[in-house]
């Protein structure tokens, strides 16, 4: 996978987390992901396709992080907390992929985006159907760990 596909997602994620949730995430060392089991409890997943490349993006939150995101973005007492956490994972994926799509457009890449899929539950799986390598980036926020995965083929 071309490393130029990673930074637009990183930049968009940091921007979304800092402006929308007032969190300053730190990014760990990227690794190659093995297997399909998610590292967290709830995932927002999206695909992107264009003439030059296609791929997928997943952002996976541990329970403490997604709970804190909902609290910071929607307020203390949210009815249907679990449902809102799932919706938030999808919305976070949508905002990050949208931001990355804009950055790619500035570099001459055109992409269409899917609507977010939401995956949840302990040990749920994330299936990137493309033949590219899946890069896993561990991240840390005030409330704990979250992860994102990128898989692109050109």
Image: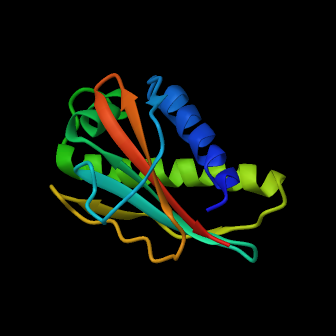
Q: Relative to residue 129, is residue 72 depicted above or below? A: above
Left or right of 86? Residue 28 is right
- Residue 27: x, y in percent? 48, 32
Residue drawn where x is 78% and y is 63% of the image? 109
- Residue 119: x, y in percent? 28, 62
Query: How many marks overall?
Result: 0
- Which image quadrant for residue 53? bottom right
Which of the pair 122/93 is nearer the observer? Answer: 122
Q: Relative to residue 23, is residue 89 depicted above or below? A: below
Left or right of 62? Residue 52 is right
- Residue 126: x, y in percent? 33, 65
- Which image quadrant for residue 72? top left
Is residue 28 in view from this perspective?
yes
Q: Quadrant of the N terminus?
A: bottom right
- Residue 85: x, y in percent? 27, 46
Is residue 80 in view from this perspective?
no
Which of the pair 133/47 is nearer the observer? Answer: 133
Left or right of 40? Residue 148 is right
Which of the pair 20/61 is nearer the observer? Answer: 61
- Which image quadrant for residue 43? bottom left
Residue drawn where x is 29% and y is 34% of the image? 65
């Amino acid at each position: 996978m071309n490393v130029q596909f990673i930074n637009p997602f990183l930049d968009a994620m940091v921007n979304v987390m800092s402006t929308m949730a007032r969190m300053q995430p730190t990014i760990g060392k990227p690794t190659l992901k093995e297997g399909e089991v998610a590292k967290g409890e709830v995932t927002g997943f999206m695909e992107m396709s264009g003439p030059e490349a296609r791929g997928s993006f997943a952002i996976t939150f541990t329970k403490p992080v997604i709970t804190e995101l909902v609290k910071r973005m929607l307020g203390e007492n949210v009815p249907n907390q679990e449902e809102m956490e799932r919706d938030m994972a999808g919305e976070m994926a949508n905002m990050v992929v949208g931001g990355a799509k804009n950055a790619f457009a500035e570099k001459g890449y055109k992409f269409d985006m899917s609507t977010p899929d939401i995956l949840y539950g302990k040990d749920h799986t994330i299936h990137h159907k493309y033949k590219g390598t899946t890069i896993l980036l561990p991240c840390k926020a005030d409330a704990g760990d979250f992860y994102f995965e990128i898989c692109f083929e050109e």
